[in-house]
Amino acid sequence: MDAIFIQILNGLDKGGAYALIALGLTLVFGTLGVVNFAHGALFMLGAFCAVTTQKLLTISKHVQDTSITFFDAYKDQPYLEIWWGDFGRTIIDWSVPLSILLTIPAMLLIGLSMERGLIRHFYKRSHAEQILMTFGLAIVLQEIIRSIFGANPIPTPAPDIIAGSAPIGALFGLDEALVYPWWRLIYLLFSIITVSGVFAFLQLTTFGMVVRAGMHDRETVGLLGINVERRFTVVFGLAAVVTGLAGAMYAPILSPDYHMGMDFLVLSFIVVVVGGMGSLRGAVAAGFLLGLLQSFASMNEVKTIIPGIDQIIIYLVAVVIILVRPRGLMGRKGVMED
Amino acid sequence: MSDKKVSELSRRGFIKVGAGALAAASMPMFFIKDAWVAKDFRNNPKGAASVKFGFNVPQTGAYADEGADELRAYKLAVKHINGDGDGGMMNTMKPLSLKGNGILGKKLEYVTGDTQTKSDAARGSAKRMIEKDGVLMVTGGSSSGVAIAVQGLCQEMGIIFMAGLTHSNDTTGKDKRRYGFRHFFNAYMSGAALGPVLKKEMGTNRKAYHLTADYTWGWTQEESIKNTTEALGWTTVETVRTPVGAGDFSQYITPVLNSGADVLILNHYGKDMINSLTQAIQFGLKDKMVDGIQFEIVVPLFSRLMAQGAGDAIKGILGTTNWNWSLQDEGSKAFVKSFGQEYGFPPSMAAHTCYVQALLYADACERAGSFYPPEVIKQLEDYDFDGMGNGPTLYRGADHQCFKDVLVVRGNANPSSQFDLLKVEQVVPSAQVTYDPKIFGGELGPYEV
């Protein structure tokens, strides 16, 4: 029972991350019709917003390291610590949550610039050309990050107070030794709030109504005198913000490195394909479903019956879905069924 | 008439041949040694004023920072071999044949290649350096998969490969090659060095759970550590293979929580090690108690560069390393000083092994008096040396594996500087980690290719 409970929690936690990433990707495809292979790079850029915040808060005074005597070595002492002591240290400690303040405007700017500067020129091109262009863009972005931050992962820890584990066993009347990392629980909560926020925005605002109408029939909405293009540009910015926030909050779970976007790219496409291209509900449902499946497939009891299933389960599900229901679980009829 | 002539020639001929044979037999061996030079071989420098080494390191990809450190060390080695700089370990290496004027009087130059930590890319760049740049020797790398692939290519092409960072038993075990040499230690040695320390720290009644990177290095390390711990009396609860570059290891860590295990052994390196260790600690494993016993995490292969990536997670964790910059022997001090003055920070263990490999190859050529690979190989085989940072060392001829002291280290809880991340707990003598080469099988192959 304990093992199943913890795998469910782990599956939901993983699913939250997959859903957040896939949500942005499917928003862009659903509105602009663009297959954005630079989406993983947006996730990576979000994580590096957290790294940048940490670096900014730890801008340091360069002082000689007297513990090393055989060559001139230097160590860094953050100015915040010098000026404000313990309070300065606390601010540095909370750099990841604080990075949200930087991530939202930075990712909005990046998203709008990408759409206006590059992607809009490819709206009427084939999907193959869109893929080539956005994939190239992803490589350029990751190489820029590598040249600035290096190739090694950069530790970006959660605040000390929530860096440990929550006693979930005691809370749910299970084995008292059962724990789960606080930050992962926060991430799950964060993903649920963000996904709900995006849905609320699209369902409850006039802006969202126009966007949804445009997703169904862009031409008719245009004929009503509404500038759909401008709204879709904002949607691209919104998708970048959602994905960037997913990346920034993921930094304590996975130390950011320049290549992390590529690692998530294939996964996010699978989530979108399984959920249904262009379906927001499908992306979220598929995210959680694949997270749970991956988590349960990694149980030793399951792997004893089907060895290696943990490494192929997601792809296996994708293959079955594409064969049986090409439009995905909740995809619109006609999409990807040509 | 003709009979007389034949008779006279035979007598003279006999005297000439007899005198010649006597002179040859009485001649010192060093006159004969240079006969190798006459034999042609791939990339023979002949009358050229310079020779080239090929530094095949990861310049892009997950191990690019480690590759950059290897390249720094190689450049320093070239400088020292050519007689520039402070000489570094050339001041401490014993015995030493290099004279500080290049190799056999020829200036040493180099070209670089990018392995990308991919076997195909590494073989491609090594081939390019051998065929187009005419390198005499290929060296470097940060992965066992890459080392085994490049070593195989070098054997086929008759070019010596001095491996960089490779820890799999297979490199000098079942996949060993006559043209491949490894200075770095291996997974078996890590197990042999860790065993007594684990016994002392954790006792003989433990239950271990392995998470293992699913490729040659991970498999051999898991096997070696498992053999060691089971010999101590530990039981192995589970061995779980994880895909390389998994990123999020949470689905592999959660089953550990209620598996009954009280030790987690992470057979991961690089980015995988950073992520799995950080996440294991987030899951509370470091503070966990199992049946009143403190849960422990062991990382059998440590590096300072990786420790930097893991941040505070590394504190208190036990592992092994090939070399650490804090060692106080003359060789280590000379190298760290030289490297520190050049670059402003201390070298990694990858940098150390690469620097030593470059010097060892150059010195072997100098001793051989030739660049002819079979003769250089014979100079390296069963060669004893000292002053290179790991105490007296043997380059064993039977498998081309170096045998030297191994360091058991622990993540430093109170580092005195940003580089002071690993504390040396014990220097395990070479004799304790030496094994019979037959246990891993493999064939070295011929000298002549």
Image: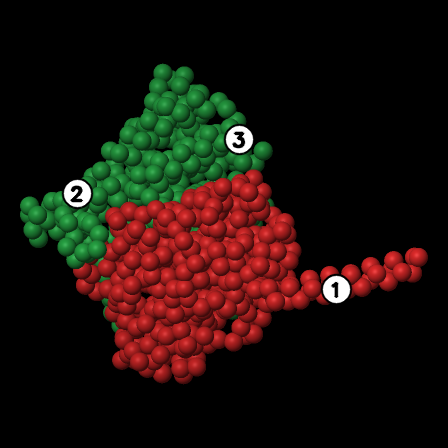
Disc 2 on helix, strand or loop? loop
Q: How far apart are marks 2 and 3 (CA)?
A: 44 Å
Which amino acid type corresponds to the residue marked 1 in the rendered image? Ile
Circle 2 residue: A59
Circle 3 residue: A128
The way the protein has been coloured in the rendering is by chain
Q: Is residue A232 above or below residue A7?
A: above
Q: Which chain carries label 2?
A: A
Q: Distance between the residues labelled 1 and 3?
A: 86 Å
Q: Is residue A218 above or below residue B446?
A: above
Q: How far apart are marks 2 and 1 (CA)?
A: 88 Å
Circle 1 residue: B15
Residue at 19% x, 41% y: name it. Answer: A56
Disc 2 and disc 1 on one polypeptide chain:
no
Q: Which chain carries label 3?
A: A
Q: Is residue B374 above or below residue B300?
A: above
Instruction: Give me the chain that's green.
Output: A
**Could you tell me if residue A101 is visible in this image?**
yes
The hue used for chain B is red
Viewer-nearest residue: B21 or A281: B21
Viewer-nearest residue: B278 or B355: B355
